[in-house]
Amino acid sequence: MDNFPGDRSCKCHGEMEPIAISVRKDGEWMLVHRCKKCGTIHTNRIAGDDDISQLMALAAKPLKNLPFPTVEA
Ligand SMILES: [Zn+2]
């Protein structure tokens, strides 16, 4: 997504992929990244230069892929 050295890269220098959005109790949105190489989970504050539409798509993912079938009444 971006190439900030250090901040979002893993110790193993693996590529971090955003996997989820998490919202803290104080209302701040956090972006959860997972290292493609070693599987380490990193949580970062959402930065101003993050792609908001991409974040929204990520946040909506669990709503589109419910772990149970939806049945119309
Ligand atoms: Zn790693």
Image (spheres, grey):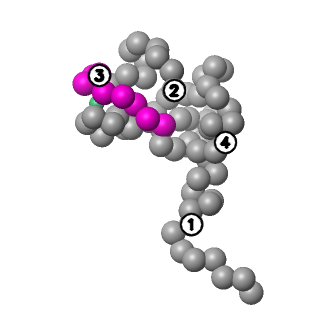
Pinpoint residue 10: horizontal percent, then vertical percent: 32, 25
What type is the residue that disc 1 sits on? Leu
On the image, numbered disc 4 is attached to which residue?
56
Label 2 sits on a secondary structure element that is loop
Cβ atoms under marks 4 and 1 closer than 8 Å = no
Q: Position of residue 54 (x, y in %)?
A: 63, 37
Name which of mark 3 and mark 1 comes first in the sequence: 3
State which mark lies toward you, 2 or 1: 2
Residue 27 visible from this viewpoint: no
Q: Position of residue 8 (x, y in %)?
A: 43, 23
- SS label for mark 3: loop
Residue at mark 2? 1
Q: Which mark is residue 13?
A: 3
3, above or below 73, in the image: above
Residue that label 1 marks: 66
Q: Which residues are magenta?
A: 11-18
Residue at screen point 51% across, 44% down: 20
Q: The disc labelled 2 sits on which kind of residue?
A: Met
Three-letter residue code for mark 3: His
Estimate how packed mark 1 is, as few (under 14), some (14 to 19) or many (20 or more) residues with alpha carbons within 10 Å.
Answer: few
Q: Is mark 3 within 8 Å of ligand 1?
A: yes
Under mark 4, the amino acid is Met
Q: Earlier in the sequence, mark 2 or mark 3?
A: 2
Judged from this view, the residue extending furthest toward the bottom is 73
Residue lying farthest top?
5
Labelled pair 3, 1 in contact (Cβ < 8 Å): no
Q: CA distance from mark 3 to mark 1?
A: 33 Å
Q: Earlier in the sequence, mark 2 or mark 1?
A: 2
Residue found 64% across the figure and 29% down from its top? 51
- Disc with the residue nearer the chain's start (4 vs 2): 2
Mark toward the start of the polypeptide (4 vs 1)? 4
